[in-house]
Image: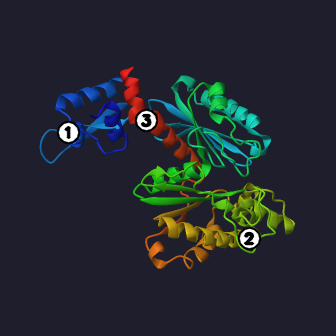
Amino acid sequence: MSGPGEVLELIRTGRAITRGDVLEITGLSRMTVSTRIDALLEAGLIVENGTERPASGRPSRLLEFNSARATVLTAAVDTTHTMVALTDLAGRLIAEERIEVAIADGPDRTLDEIAATARRVLAGARTPLERVAAIGISIPGPVDPDTGRPSQPPIMPGWDAYPIPDHLRDALGVPVLVANDADAAALGEQRAAHADSRALCFIKVSSGIGAGIVIGGQVYQGTDGGAGDIGHVKLAGHDDEVCQCGAHGCLAAVASGRAVARALSALGKNAESGSDVGAYLAAGDPDAAALTRAAGRVIGGVVATVVSLLNPGEVVLGGMLASAPLLAGVRETLYPRSLPRATRHLTVSQSTLGEHAGIVGLATLVVEREYSAAAVNAALSS
């Protein structure tokens, strides 16, 4: 039998917007539905807002998930910087602050800086820590879905198996959720711009390369969090390119922001990371554009395999190198190397949310965990 948590899930996901919808979907009695909804209203989890006017009969009050009930802290960690943000439960941005801390500085310093920045963001938004449902943090590496710890991240030396949840929970006193950065961004894009998508792939091209996969509205992590790690697919003919993971010929070694930065440096331009390449692209630098397009062609060859395997409806390009040149390069090889049937309904586009995709995705993941049917049922029965 559906408890208040299951009723909340119907309302939160938009499948039910009136008491009549809940009655019809659950098959519960009118009294039971009224009891469930009253409990959710009393707990502040939903609000009644406005009315729906049916073709006949009395108007019905509209039920909505109360996105103002609490807030979510998020921290999107990249190789050279981190974006710390505060959102409501719908993922709408309240405040944010960028900090220049590199993952190479190690987990202790990075996480301490995140905690300190989170407190500043909360103070600036005049939001007490007690109103924070949880903090979601994304990292540029695989995450063990059972422990929330980094799982042999190729470009994060010193982070393997580090207890990120424990560190941040001790520092802030709120629940912690850890996700892969491409996974979080993929979910953010799917929720914001491709809500009806059956399958979406988000390709993040920054200092490294990774893919996030959303199937049926849910992130696909793989058996132990390693799904989408396309940056370490080996490319023939590139055995002289050494990757940060220590292997030779990885896609990331050939076509990532770090690789493009290296090529720009060879041309006499100051570039060390994907962020630097992104700055050159934003300024319209022709060398950065040409090298990024060439990198896109290499990436497109690998993404063609992803498309043939998953048959997604959308491939979304994000990260510091997301640009018209990258998009053009990916398209140049993706379509010729894929069967027409695999791409006939495919759209390949740039991220609509940019660097905020991960923030929206993290807020979504936090809400789906903290306000799941099981969590709500447990909270309301205690």
Name the secondary structure under disc 3: loop
The residue that disc 2 covers is: 291
Question: What amino acid is at disc 1?
Answer: Gly
Question: What amino acid is at disc 3?
Answer: Ser
Q: Earlier in the sequence, mark 3 or mark 2?
A: 3
Q: Which of marks 1 and 3 is nearer the N terminus?
A: 1
Nearer mark to the viewer, of 1 and 3: 1
- Residue 205, position in %: x, y? 66, 59
How far apart are the alpha carbons under marks 1 and 3?
27 Å
Question: What amino acid is at disc 2?
Answer: Leu
- Residue 258, position in %: x, y? 76, 59
Q: Earlier in the sequence, mark 1 or mark 2?
A: 1
**Quarter occupied by the C terminus:** top left
Name the secondary structure under disc 2: helix
Q: Which mark is residue 339?
A: none
**Quadrant assignment, res 368:** top left
The residue that disc 3 covers is: 67
How packed is label 3: few (under 14 Cα within 10 Å), some, or many (20 or more)? some
How packed is label 1: few (under 14 Cα within 10 Å), some, or many (20 or more)? few
Q: Is residue 182 visible?
A: yes
